[in-house]
Amino acid sequence: MKSQRNQRRIVAAAVCAALTLGLAGGAYAQASDVTGGTTTDSSSAGNANGGGLPQIQQKGDVSFVSGGVGVDESTALQHAQSEWPLSLRFTGPGSDFLADVHVRVVDAHDDEVLSATSRGPYMLVKLRPGRYTVHAQYKDRDQARSVTVPAKGTAKAAFYWNTQ
């Protein structure tokens, strides 16, 4: 009986170790698609941006950052909004923050300039001044907002899904 418990503990420990290594490998693989941070900086989870701001990502000539699940990250993103031409927010009932929202931004010529998935309720995007349509999809529900990014200043768009 005691030997069976020990075997179960050993198997459980081996499974935990394998999962930990698998998650670490996945995080390392994701880091190759991210810019703006370093693995040697201990501030903000290894992010050279510091101050709790998530990693800045690049798709083509568009930079963006998303997140806001934790208090530090949420506060950092809210404070950084004035430095980014476009700010997006994703919420549900009771102002619940949403993550995993697929975002697609198209310009006035209907050319896609960004396709990405938000890692949290906030997404900040560096776009050239102009008119854009932001398409946001949460689960199976799509929404679109027209935005004009000014030469100076910022544009904001909020998306709300009634998920109940």
Image (cartoon, rainbow, N blue to C red):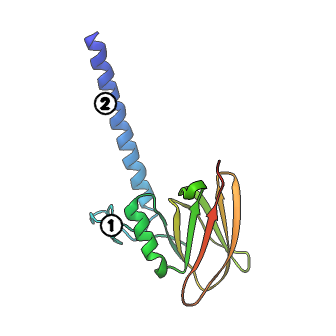
Q: Quadrant of residue 90?
A: bottom right
Which one is nearer the viewer's eye here, 118 or 75?
75
Which one is nearer the viewer's eye here, 28 or 143?
143
Q: In the figure, is residue 18 to the left or right of 41?
A: right
Inspect the image, locate mark 2, and give the three-letter code of the amino acid beneath it.
Ala
Per the image, the residue denoted by label 2 is 13
SS under mark 1 = loop
- For residue 38, the mark is 1
Instruction: Find residue 164 and report its horizontal and vertical position in percent.
Output: 65, 47
Which one is nearer the viewer's eye here, 107 or 123?
123
At x 65% / y 57%, what residue is drawn? 161
Inspect the image, locate mark 1, and give the three-letter code of the amino acid beneath it.
Thr
Q: Quadrant of residue 89?
A: bottom right
Calculate the distance from the C-alpha at mark 1 to the C-alpha at mark 2. 31 Å
Q: In the figure, is residue 135 to the left or right of 79?
A: right
At x 35% / y 43%, what residue is drawn? 21
> Which sits earlier in the primary sequence, circle 1 or circle 2?
2
Quadrant in the picture for the N terminus = top left
Instruction: Find residue 33 and report its horizontal and vertical position in percent.
Output: 47, 63
SS under mark 2 = helix
- For residue 78, the mark is none
Crowding at mark 1 (Cα within 10 Å: few <14, some 14-19, many 20+): some
Report if the CB atoms under discs 1 and 2 are less than 8 Å apart: no
Furthest residue toward right: 109
At x 54% / y 56%, what residue is drawn? 96
Furthest residue toward bottom: 151
Q: Quadrant of residue 69?
A: bottom left
